[in-house]
Image (cartoon, rainbow, N blue to C red):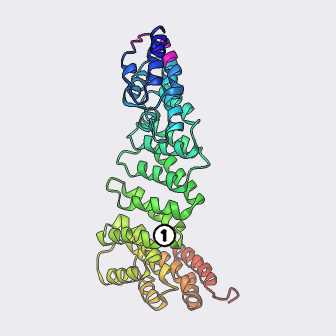
Amino acid sequence: TIVTQCVDALKPPLRQLVYFALAGEDESALAKLDVKDPDQMARVLRALTPVARGGPKETELVTQALVDPSPRLRRAALQLAATVARRRPGAYGSVLARALAAADPLLRRLARSVVRSLPGKTQTQLLGQALGLGAKQDARRDVLNALDARTDSSAAALAGAAVGILAGADVDAASAALAWRLIDTALARDAAEATGELAHLLDAGEASEAVRVRAMTLLSERAPEESFAAIAPAVETLVRAGKPGLLVAALPLLARVAPDAARAKLVALAQAAGATAEVRVAIAGAWGQLAKASPDDAEMGLDKLLDDDASKVRAAASRAYGHLGRIALEELGDIIKHEPRDVVEGAAWGLVAAVEAGAPASR
C-alpha cells in the first residue's frame, strides 16, 4: 500500500516507531529496534512516549534503559513510564516502584522527580509499593520522606506504609523515627483510619516488643471509640500470651477497648502469684481505666495494690485510685501524709483525676 511504501522509505529507528504506532497491540516493530548509543536510545524513547501503551516489549525496553548508566536515557525511560501511567492507571507501576526503591541514588532521585508529575493518589500508591519491595535504608528513608511531604495522602495509606516498615525485623533508627512520624500525621488526619492500620502491628510476627508496646500506647491514647471492636481481638491475644513486657501496655489498652474482658483478666491476675512490679503497675492503670464502669471491682483491686511492697506500684495505684472520684479523696489524703515522694506524686495526680471524675476541688 501507499502507506507501507511511505513508512518503508523512512530510516530506522523512525520506521519501527511509525509501524509500532500503526500496529495497535502488535509490538513486533519494537523487537526490530537496534540502537546501541544511549543518547540515540533516549531520543527513541522520547519519540515513542506519545504512542507508548505499556506492552511487554515496550516495558522490556524501558527496564533495560533504567540499568544503563546514562542519566539522559534513564530520565527518558522514566518519563515514558510516567506518561503511560497517567493515561493507563496501573501501567508501569512495578517499574516506577522499583526505581523509587533502587539502590542507586541517582535513579531514585530521577524517579521521584518523574513520579511527582502523577496524580496524588498514584504517587502515594507507588511510594507504598516501593516500601514493600524491601528497600535498603537510604532508599527507605527517601521514600518515607516523600510520603511525609504529601498533604493529600489518606491516613490509611500513610499509616499502612509506616506499619509496613515497623513490622520488619531490621528497621534502622532513622527509618523507624520517620515511620512513627507518619503514623502521628495519619492519626491527626483521620484517627479511625490510622488506628485500623496501626492495630496490625500488634500481631506482626517480626515487630519488636518495643514497637508493639509503643503502638499499644498510641492506641490507648488516641484510638477513637468506633475502632475499639476492631482492636480488641489482637489485644486480647497479647494479654492471653502473658508476656510481661507486652502485658504492661496491653492491660490498660484492653481496659479501654474491651472492659468486660479486661475485668475478668484483672481478677484472674489478682489471684495469681508471680506478677512482676511492672505488670502490677499495668494492672493498676487498667483498674483506673475501669473505675467508672466497674467502681466496686476497681476499688477492691486498687486497695490491694495500695499496700504493695513496691513503691512504684503504690504510686501507680494511687494515681489510678483517683478515677473513683469523691470516695478516693480521704485515702489519697492519707497517702500524701505518710508515703514517700514517688507515691505522693502519684497521689497528687490521683487527686487531679478525682476532681475530673466529679469530686469537689475545694475539699
Magenta stretch: includes residue 37: yes
Residue at 50% across, 25% down: 106
- In the depicted structure, whether residue 106 falls above or below residue 218: above
Q: Main secondary structure of the magenta part?
A: helix
Residue closest to the eye, 154 or 91 = 91
Left or right: 60 as drawn, with respect to 335: left
Task: Please say if 269 is above or below 47.
Answer: below
Answer above or below: position of 289 versus 193. Answer: below
**Drawn side of residue 231 relative to residue 330, left or right:** left
Task: Check residue 86 for magenta coloring.
Answer: no
Q: Residue 132's spot in the image, x, y percent?
A: 40, 44
Q: What is the three-letter code of the residue carrying label 1? A: Ser
Whether residue 49 is situated above or below residue 126 in the rendered picture? above
Picture residue at 60% right of the left edge, 49% below the top:
152
Q: Residue furthest front?
A: 1
Q: Which residues are magenta?
A: 34-44
Residue 24 place in picture, x, y as percent: 43, 29
Q: Position of residue 351 (x, y in %)?
A: 60, 81
In terms of depth relative to the viewer, which is nearer, 247 or 237? 237
Foreground residue, 278 or 174? 174
Q: Is residue 316 visible?
A: yes
Task: Give the residue displayed 43% in from the left and 25% down from the top.
Answer: 23
Quarter of the view holding residue 199:
bottom left
Q: Which residue is mark 1?
A: 227
